[in-house]
Amino acid sequence: MRSQETISDVVPDTPLPDGRHPVLRVIPQPSIDLAAAERAAAAFLHALGIDLDSEVMAQTPKRMARGFAELLEPREFTLTTFPNTERYDEMVAARHIPFVSLCEHHMFPFVGFATVGYLPGDRILGLSKLARVVEHFARRPQVQERFTAQIARWLDEHLGPRGVGVIVDAEHLCMTIRGVRATGARTTTSALLGAFRDDPRVRAEFLDLAGD
Ligand SMILES: Nc1nc2c(ncn2[C@@H]2O[C@H](COP(=O)(O)OP(=O)(O)OP(=O)(O)O)[C@@H](O)[C@H]2O)c(=O)[nH]1
Ligand SMILES: [Zn+2]
C-alpha cells in the first residue's frame, strides 16, 4: 500500500516567532515496488490480449511500471522562506505552472496549468517553491478539486501569507479521449483563502491575472 503522506522534516534552524520554520524539508515516502508493478503490467497486457513476444514489446511492462512510478513519485524539496524586509505587500503569483497528474477514477493523466498566488505577510517564498508544491500534490492519484485545495491549504499553513489563491485549468484524458470523448474540454477549479476569498479587489486581481 502506497503512503500518500508527506513527511516534513525541519533542517536545524531557529523557529520563527509564529512557530513556522524558514527551511522545511519535504520528504515524500512513496512505496513503489517496481518489480511487482512490472509483473502486474505484463499480466494486465496479457489480459487485454496483447502479445508481448516481440523484441520491442518484451520491455513494455518494464517501461509501463517505470512510467507510472515517475508520475507517482514526488521529488524531495525544501520550502525556503525569507524575511519580507521590503514589506512587499502586493500579490506574488506564478502563472502557467505545468503539471501532470493521474485521475484517481481511471488512472488516466490529467494535464494542465496552475496559477498560484499569495499576499506576503512576514515572509516571502523562493519563487520556484510555488511550482514545487504544485508538483508535489500532482504526483499521486488525484481529483482536480482536492489537488487545487491541497496546494492552497499547504501554502497557507507553511508560509502564513495574508491570503493564497490557486487556479487549475486541465484536460482530463479520461473525459477527452475515451468515455464521453469531449475533445478539447477543459476543467477549471479554484481555491481562495484569506484575502483572496474576503477582499473583492484581491479576488478580482487574481482571477483576472489567471485568466490571461
Ligand atoms: N469531480 C471530478 N471528477 C473527475 C475527475 N477526474 C475524473 N472525474 C470523473 O469521475 C467520474 C467517474 O465516473 P464513473 O461513472 O464511475 O466512471 P465511468 O463509467 O468511466 O464514467 P465516464 O467517464 O462518464 O464514462 C467521471 O465522470 C469522470 O469524468 C476530477 O478530477 N474531479
Ligand atoms: Zn478519470
Image (cartoon, rainbow, N blue to C red):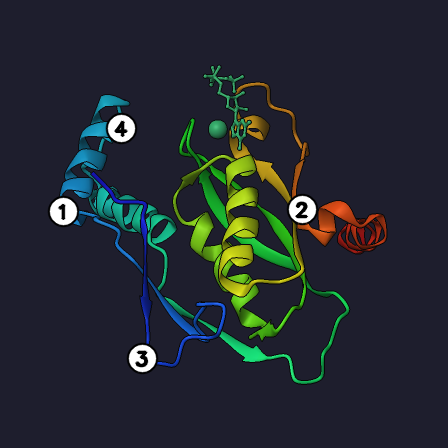
| Point 38% across, 49% down: residue | 71
Q: Amino acid at mark 3?
A: Pro
Label 1, label 3: how far apart the Cα atoms are: 37 Å
Task: Find the residue positioned furthest to the bottom.
Answer: 85
Question: What percent of the width, then of the height, locates residue 37?
Answer: 20, 41
Q: Amino acid at mark 2?
A: Leu
Element type where label 4 sits in the image: loop
How crowded is the residue under tag 3: few (<14 C-alpha within 10 Å), some, or many (20+)?
Answer: few
Label 2, label 4: how far apart the Cα atoms are: 46 Å
Earlier in the chain: of badge 2 and badge 4, it is: 4
Earlier in the chain: of badge 4 and badge 1, it is: 1
- Residue identified by numbered label 1: 35
Check if mark 4's residue and mark 3's residue have beta carbons within 8 Å. Answer: no
Earlier in the chain: of badge 1 and badge 3, it is: 3
Label 3, label 2: how far apart the Cα atoms are: 32 Å
Element type where label 1 sits in the image: helix
- Residue identified by numbered label 3: 12
